[in-house]
Amino acid sequence: MVVISQESRFEEANDHKFSHYSFRIEQGIPLHPNLATFNRFKFSASKGVKIGSAFFSTLFNGGSLVGATGPYQAFAIGGANSVRGYGEGAVGSGYSCVVSKNEFSFPLDKQLTGVIFLDFGSDLKSGHRVLGNPGLRKGKPGTGIGIGYGIRFNTELVQITADCAINAFKQRTLYFGINNLIL
């Protein structure tokens, strides 16, 4: 199979705001008659703005997949990089999806930042199209919302993060991470 990919991006940033937009299209063309053709597109849009000493950012991304592909090609929704408060892929898996992540961060002192967030994701009722319908078999809801709070501790080398997220089932999940490691 030959996969042709095209991506368009736009980015703009300064000290008070940022914008990022990207759109990617992939087409799989079979070299053998037994293989299937597929088309996939993904999009991402994010914006951030400084409000006094605080900062608000939002990210909206998603995509769609058309064609005969395996279940591993489906979009997995849920997890630290998607909808916090759920495990990886626990919201759903589908051939279409949207995810929205919104964060409001505010300084607590020179090295410590507080964060409040709201995340949402959906498989856009496309989970039944995935071969074997794994979302239904595993009891995934198909849509999910996560709210929570966290802290960011900045050092000279890394940023240490800790988040507490609560999902629609009132289950709590803690996330810990290290970002921006400089060696």
Image (cartoon, rainbow, N blue to C red):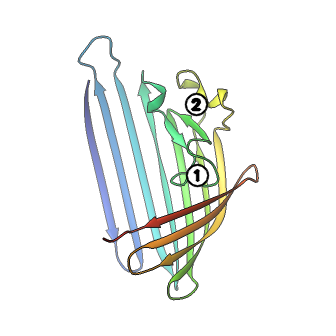
Image quadrant in which you'd find residue 150: bottom right
* Image position, residue 7 (x, y; %): 28, 46
Q: Name which residue type carries label 1.
A: Val
Image quadrant in which you'd find residue 151: bottom right
Q: Name which residue lies at 44% across and 32% down.
A: 73
Considering every residue shown, the one lying at the far front of the view is 183
Helix, strand or loop under label 2: helix
Q: Crowding near pointer 2: few (<14 within 10 Å), some, many (20+)?
A: many
Cα separation between marks 2 and 1: 17 Å
Image quadrant for the N terminus?
top left
Considering every residue shown, the one lying at the far bottom of the view is 110
Residue occupied by mark 2: 127
* In the foreground, 153 or 101: 153
Q: Name which residue lies at 53% across and 51% down.
A: 82
Q: Name which residue lies at 65% across and 47% down.
A: 144
Q: Name which residue type carries label 2.
A: Gly
Whether residue 166 sits left or right of residue 41 in the image: it is right
Q: Name which residue lies at 60% across and 38% down.
A: 92
Image quadrant in which you'd find residue 34: top left
Mark 2 or mark 1: name the one nearer the start of the chain.
1
Residue occupied by mark 1: 83
* Image position, residue 15 (x, y; %): 38, 80
Label of residue 97 in the image: none
Helix, strand or loop under label 1: loop
Q: Crowding near pointer 1: few (<14 within 10 Å), some, many (20+)?
A: many
